[in-house]
Amino acid sequence: MKYERLGGSGLQVSQLGLGTNAFGKRADQAASTAVLHTALDNGINFIDTANIYAGTESERIIGEALTGRRHEAVLATKAGLVRSPGPGGSGSSRFHIMRELEESLRRLKTDYVDLYQIHTFDPHTPLEETLRTLDDMVSSGKVRYIGASNYAAWELVKALGISERMGYERYVSLQCSYSLADRTPERELVPACLDQGVGIIPYFPLAGGILTGKYSAGKEAPTGSRADTDPNFARFLTGERIALGHETAAVAAELETSPVALSLAWLMSRPAVSTVIVGATRAEQLEESLKGVSLDLSAETLDNLNAVSRSFIHCEPFAVYRLPE
């Protein structure tokens, strides 16, 4: 495994990280535990979850699975999206995130998290309140580092400016959708993160499986695929994205590798990217993703991939999660 610093911090994270959105939902406890242990056994130390994944089951399963192995993991969780209806049930107010951190720690069976992330920008809470609360969490020892997710570039830079002015802990990372099928972060987020020393943590690196080339226009989705199990996913299956999936698969075939490994290797080569989150419901899926870490891409291959995906710089993001205004 190869490791990178998370942004400008001293925290070292594996280039490939494990996303656990499927734990407790598309993967039961036994399968999830097997995936997590396979990740740790192969040097993946970055484990990413959230307080709302599969209700709260993802965190609970991880807490059980890390028994005796907590020291091997850089454990990251999030709060801020809707946890419960009504006042105080979402957002990044002191009231909400202090309560959610305590509940996450209990489910994760740990007394600290390595990276605590605000899941999305909260337009209803002053950033000063959020950042002061996160600073207190670090001072208490319950949080090691702080990060943001689904922030626009201006929101991130504003937060960093407040932290600098007030002497608060600063965000060291930013999670966003980023892949060959979604290069929109390159317009503003990537330059901002490079300038400010913030590490990017891409999610949806395979565009929900589209970049594997398994989808075809006018044909039924493969059995067991995301589009098969989640009817709402069909909205992502545009002709342009499906074509990109086939082009990616063709390049991978020429290199005698898989489109999964190729797509991940391209993303790991991008400026500001610290670790790439991949999900898995079976250990075998994770083993395929691991091949991307050792895949060295030539300048010609990188140029080819950049060319076929260039139109996805100036398009709508593949995914972004926000609170209602």
Image: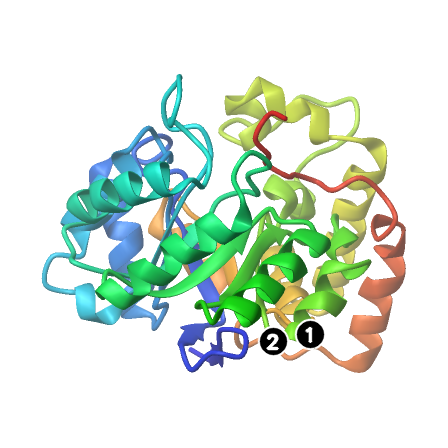
* Spot occupied by residue 171 in the image (x, y as percentages of width and height): 51, 64
Q: Quadrant of residue 304?
A: bottom right
- What residue is shown at x 79% (from left), y 72% (from top)? 302
Q: Are marks 1 and 2 in contact (CB under 8 Å)?
A: yes
Q: Residues within 10 Å of mark 2 (few under 14, many from 20)?
A: some
Which residue is at the front of the view, 211 or 143? 143
Name the mark on residue 194: 1
Q: Which residue is mark 2?
A: 197
* Spot occupied by residue 231 in the image (x, y as percentages of width and height): 58, 18
Q: Which amino acid is tagged 1?
A: Leu
Q: Is residue 4 left or right of residue 320?
A: left
Which quadrant of the figure contains the C terminus?
Answer: top right
- What residue is shown at x 83% (from left), y 64% (from top)? 306
Which quadrant of the figure contains the N terminus?
Answer: bottom left
* Spot occupied by residue 221 in the image (x, y as percentages of width and height): 63, 26
> Distance from label 1 to label 2 (Cα)?
5 Å
Which residue is at the front of the view, 137 or 208? 137
Q: Is residue 241 left or right of residue 39?
A: right
| Up-down relation of residue 323 to residue 116 (above or below) | above
Q: Which amino acid is tagged 2?
A: Gly
